[in-house]
Every structure is written in C-alpha cells, then in structure tokens.
Image: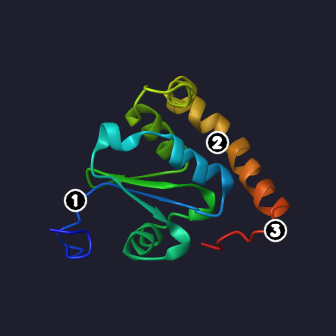
Amino acid sequence: MSDRAQTSTERLGEPWLLYDGECPFCARYVQLTRLRETVGALRIINARDGGPELAEAQAASLVIDDGMVLKLDGQLYHGDACLNRLALLSSRSTLFNRFAYWSFRSPTVARVSYPALKLGRSLALRLLGRERMGY
C-alpha cells in the first residue's frame, strides 16, 4: 500500500521525525544522518508543513522551536532527548554519523550542549531572515 493510501491509524506505529525544514542546521542534520539504514521506514516531516504529527507534538506540549521531535515505539523524544536517541539510532557508516554518535550518545552531554545548539539555530534563522515557527 502506498504512503498516500495508508490511513493515519495504519501509520500510527510508524516512526517519524519532525523538524524545522527552514533551519539550515536541522535540515542538514536530517539529510546527513542515515537513520533509514538503521530504523527502516522512518517518515521525516517538515513541521512547517503542519499535519497530524505536529498536532500530536503540540498536544504533548512540545514546542518545535525548542527542538526536533522523534516518535519511536509510541514514545515522543524532544530536543536533547531526541538528539541523543538519533545519535544512538543512526548508522556509523559516515564520518558525520560517527561524530554525532560520539558527541551525543550520552544523555548528559546532549542535555548540556543542547542550549548552544538552540542558540545557533536562532542566530542562523535571524541571519537568514527566516522567522521562528512560533510553535
């Protein structure tokens, strides 16, 4: 069955990653990580397009401007927890993925470094003349 033909109920158990498609760091990170090699059928969704995944994240009081959201095995991971989980899940097949793994495999390191990453995102959006999403 094609993606379009699947109902939201059928897709409920599928993992997904919600990110800001206009953030150059987020977009590049999503492009460089080889998550589909290890996770399989992972849907990667630009939060600026809206949709049920964004609604689900918002219903859980997760602010997308504060970080990406990963849904895996029914669990939502946000911000530093998402970064940590992505590092653990991604393939180590490239230099970037090995760097991300070694940098963020520790939940503590991900939590401590995450504010600097958020600041970098905010500055990049401002320099590029892009608005924060506001959600």
Q: At which x and y percent is residue 126?
A: 82, 63
Amino acid type at circle 2 is Tyr
For label 3, the residue is 129
Q: Say which element carries label 2.
A: helix
Judge left or right: residue 134 versus residue 97. Answer: right
For label 2, the residue is 114
Badge 2 or badge 3: first in the primary sequence: 2
Q: Between residues 104 and 75, which one lies in front from this camera angle? A: 104
At 48% from the left and 76% from the top, the residue drawn is 50
**Pointers 2 and 3 in contact (CB under 8 A)?**
no
Which mark identifies residue 13?
1
- The alpha-carbon separation of the residues under discs 3 and 1 comes to 37 Å
At 62% from the left and 58% from the top, the residue drawn is 66
Q: At which x and y percent is residue 73?
A: 26, 50
Q: Say which element carries label 3.
A: loop
Marker count (numbered)? 3
Q: At which x and y percent is residue 100?
A: 55, 31
At 59% from the left and 72% from the top, the residue drawn is 135
At 70% from the left and 69% from the top, the residue drawn is 132
